[in-house]
Structures are given as C-alpha cells and as structure tokens.
Amino acid sequence: MVERPASVLKELLENALDAGATRIKVQVEAGGRKLVQVTDNGCGMVRDDALLAFERHATSKIKDAEDLLNIHTLGFRGEALPSIASVGRVLLETRAADEPSGTVMEIAGGKILRVEEAGLPPGTSIAVRDLFFNTPARKKFLKAESTELSHIATLVTHYALAHPDKHFELHSATNAMLIAAPVPSHSDRIYQIFGRETLDQLVPVAATMKLDRVGIPEPPPWRRGEDYTPPVPGDIRLHGFVSKPEVQKLNRNSIFIFVNGRLIRDRLVQHALTEGYRNILPPTVYPVVLLFVELPNAEVDANVHPSKMEVRFRQHSLVHDFVRDSVRAALMKARPVPQFTREISAQPNAAQGLSPGAWAHAGEAPQPGAGEEFNLQAHPQAPLNERLQFAGAPIAVEANAAISGFGPAGLPTMERQGTQDQSVCGNVLPDEDQAVADELVLASLKPVGQVRDSFILAVNADGLWIIDQHVAHERVLFEKILRERVRAVQEGQRLLMPMIVELTPGQQAVFSEISEELRRNGFEVDLFGSRTIAIKTAPAGVQPADVDKMLLELLDQFQREEQALNLEKIRVKIAASIACHAAIKINMPLEQHKMEWLLRELAKTECPMSCPHGRPVVLRYSVKDIQRAFKRI
C-alpha cells in the first residue's frame, strides 16, 4: 500500500537495485508530493515487459513456487508499480541495453494514456507526479513538506550505507542533498557521509558461523529424485559497526539493520543488540548501530509484512544468540576508556542519528527545502598524522588507516604503524593486546586520595584518573560472583531472625520461576503463607537491612521484562544486584592499601571501564587535556 512519498521511493529504489544499477539518481519536489523520480542505469525493460510491469501481481523475479522460499531480490510481489500508478501520474522511460530503442509509457490513475518508442539511454527512469491526485482523503494525511522530505532523505541515506559500491544522488528542487560516489567499504561510506567524528565513535563488528548443523532441512528419502543434490548449509555472517558505550540515544532511531541487503525493523535482532549491551549501557538508552546480517535466502522469510520491513528467521534463536555474542565480543575487544571532558557533557540524546531525517527533526541542521541543503559531500581526507588517544597512551596512525574497511573476507583490514596494529576505527587493539593494555594501565595507577570519600583520585604517566569506588567494586564483585556461580553454589550468611516479606501476585509468580537460582546465589527462602516468604539466609556481603529491598527490586525487574526469562538473564541480573548491594558504598573513607587493592582487582576484570548497569567506572583527564587547560599547548 502506498502511504507516503517515501514508500513510493522505497519500491522504486529496490527495483533499481534489483535491476543491477550502479548509479541511482533520485529527484523530488515539494517533499515528494509533486514529484518522485528515480533514474538508474540498470538492465532496463523491453516494450512487452514494460507493459506487463503495471499488471497486478506480475513479476519477473519469481519463476516458480519454490522461489517464494528462496527470495534473493528486494521486490518480488508485483504489487508496487500497479499500486503507485493507481494513485499518481507515472511516466516510465526504459531501454534494455541490447535494444535499439526504448519505451515511453504514461499512466494516470491506473489508466495507460500512451505507449511509444523513443531514443533513450540504457536503464530506467520512473517519475511519479501529483501523488494522491485522485484520492484527496489520503493526500490530506500527508505531513509537512519538510517532514516528508526527511523521510525520503533518511531512506536514501540508508540504502547508500547498505550499498557503498554504488553511486547515489538525492536532489530536491535545486539542492543536492546527497551525492555519494562509490567507495570500497562500509567504513568509507560512513566517513564519506557523516565524517570522521561519527566513524571514531563506532566499533567494527565482524563474525561468521557455519550452519552445518542447523542448515536447511532435507526432504525425506522417498521425495529425492535421482538428480537430487543436498542443499548447501552455508554460513551466517555479521559485519558492520556498533557505537562505544559513551554514545547514548534516547530511542532506537539510530539502529539500522540490514538482512541480505534489506532494511528491516526486527524485534528479535533489536533484542539481541540490547542483550549485547547489557551491563555496558544503562537500560533506558540505546546505541548507534549499523549491522549487516547475511545468510542463505532459504533461512529467512521476507514475505511476512506488507511493507517488507519485518522478516522471520527459520533459526530465530540461533540468529539472536549469534548477533548478541558477536556484538558483545566486539565491545569487549574495544573497551574504550571514557574521557573526562567528554563524559562531563555526555547526555542521552535522540539526535544526531545516522540519517539526515534525524537532523531535520532535531533542528540541529537546516531543514531541506527551506533554501538550504545537507552538505553530505565526502570530507577531504588529509594525509596528516593524527594522534588518537587510547587508555591514556597516544598512538600515531595515518589518517587513512582510521577508515580502512573490511577486506574481502569480511574481516577488518589492519594498517601497521610501528609495532601496533590499528583496526578500522583507529583506536581498537586486538583482544589479547587490549586486555594487557587495560590491565597495565589500571595497575600502574597510584591512588593519591579521595573526593568526599566517594571517588578515588589516582595518577600515572598518562594523566589524572577518577574512579567511582562503588561501581569499581561492583564490577569486581559482579565478575567474581559469576565465576564462582559457575563452579559451585554460593554460600550465604545466616540471618539472626528470619525476615518476613509479603509478595504481590505478580512478584509471587516471578519468585516461583527464579527461586532455584536465588538459592544457588546464597538465598534460603521458605514459603510462609499464601503470598508470604521467610528469608533465612542472604548472600554474603549484603547488609541485613538491604536484603528484603534487594529481593523486591529483583522481583520487580523481572516482572517488567517483556521478553521471556532465561537462565543466563536471571543469573546476570541476580549477580548485578548482589554486587551492587555488597559493594563499597560512597561516603566511605578508604585507606591507602584498600584503594590500591581495589585498582589492582579492577584491572583484572574483563570489562573494567563500566559497571554492570552501564555507568562509567573510570574517567581520565589526560596530560594533553591538562596542558591544554593551562594554555601550554
């Protein structure tokens, strides 16, 4: 169904990509109300195919019924062009490369007005004018021109990001809103459109897994013919970028997921991303994500939503866990250190997202169509040596190394400078080197005191460090609890008197589901009536006065969960809650040896830079920042 100019453009863009176009030009007027035109250099159509294209349910992309289970094109239903032609004035100009002449068709309100031959370049151009001219009720519900134009700009930007090897242009009236020439990689495309600052906030992700054991099921033996060939399971591959923990958005508008080149909004993948950022980001904010999932076409069904914005995976739990684990591994590999000056002003925000539409809504950039334009031209790549900060140690790299993209195998290409490897973002070290770097930097810190008995001040050769003593100890305890929980049941501390707690019906339902895991973490709880429990033993380290509060908080958290509970989620939440209530508190004086012990233990953790709830543990005020503040540089 045609809802707005952007939905018209989506169908025309996908047809151009299916036609093999390498250059796509989009032209709009009045936010798409007056004109939406897409010109491409694809394969084009002969006269008979052009006539057939506007018949309902006529498609050249499905040969037989089996193709519905193996969709490899963006469009396949044969509904788009007839639907568009029924609510607008359409002019089609097309020529196949091996034909001497092309075809021009003019259609208004679903009726063919003329068909004639003409001399045309190879490819196709479709212009849709006066959208909803014959359906004023639907035209009435269109938004302002700037709003409709922002939807169009967002859509074109998304497809430009997904296809860096193709040339995209977007023009509104006399303004060039986007001109993106072909580039070798997705990282280059991000740099080209959004610049170095955005690219430096992203962490590359690349992972591959074979589907040998969970591949396409084979038919029974009696249905296999003599020429039967077993299906090849293939691989599931993930690549793209996720943002560092300090980048926080108020909504999911900056999460872009492509499955086999198709832009989707999938709850399964979005939940996997949330799980990947669990204990790294606060639960009320969202990251910036640009992810590409590639898997055999038979493993995904794109025919489950009218606008094809949702898909269904055959192995949905496998895809969920693969995305979650891949994103988590990339974040653990990067482990960026929060910068003191950046974190002071860091607040969750809804813009700037990875789309021009977000800029327009936020008012942070001129709105298109108002006499100004988006300047999305490629930024000049200066061949200057820049010094990028990582964990306090400045690393010299070439500017071009920071935008080296993915190689042919889908893995980040590495540029060597001196003795250290730099990946696509210029400040990411390989796993083992990164862990060593974190441990060495944190272990080298020398505590010099406390601020209000809450924050540890420490120094080393890299500058001044501020450590939140509560969340630092919380991270140490959290990982210790998870390690010990895997090996054995946690020991608890016996309460002097059992603590009686009354539960609501919802809390009681959750308690019955997590009671076994509570027991394994040191709780000993007995039923004491229909909805009353008696706590006899609590986890070691938790103050008796906090036991009932901690238990009720846990039950309320699980009660608010929209997704089904699983053992891993229960285990992590309980560990995080115990660590929080057992950790060193703020306003607590610490002796020198206690501060030194805490920093040593923090250096040994897997994720020392953020607490289990996503807050930063350490902040660094680098020597360069100090020199700059004193006007020495």
Image (spheres, rainbow, N blue to C red):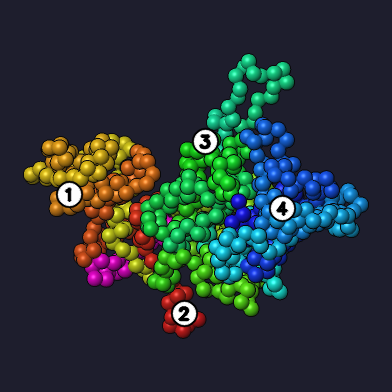
Mark with earlier residue (3, 4): 4
Q: Position of residue 329 (x, y in %)?
A: 48, 48
- Residue 548's label in the rendered image is 1
Image side of residue 165 versus residue 361, left or right: right
Question: Amino acid under label 2?
Answer: Arg
| Magenta stretch holds residue 456 | yes
The structure residue drawn at horizontal position 71% and vertical position 63%, both measured from the top left corner, is: 129
Circle 3 or circle 4, nearest the eye: 4
Mark with earlier residue (3, 1): 3
Mark with earlier residue (1, 2): 1
How many other residues sit within 10 Å of disc 2, few (<14), some (14-19) or many (≥20)?
Answer: few
Circle 4 or circle 2, nearest the eye: 4
The structure residue drawn at horizontal position 47% and vertical position 83%, both measured from the top left corner, is: 632
Q: Position of residue 384 (x, y in %)?
A: 64, 71
Residue corresponding to mark 4: 110
Circle 1 or circle 4, nearest the eye: 4
- Residue 315's label in the rendered image is 3
Q: Are marks 1 and 2 in contact (CB under 8 Å)?
A: no
Instruction: State the SS at label 3.
Output: loop
Mark with earlier residue (2, 3): 3
The structure residue drawn at horizontal position 30% and vertical position 40%, both measured from the top left corner, is: 485
Quarter of the figure with residue 90: bottom right
Instruction: State the SS at label 1.
Output: helix
Image side of residue 12 versus residue 291, left or right: right
Distance Cα–Cα, label 1 vs label 4 = 68 Å
For the record, the magenta segment spans: 438-458
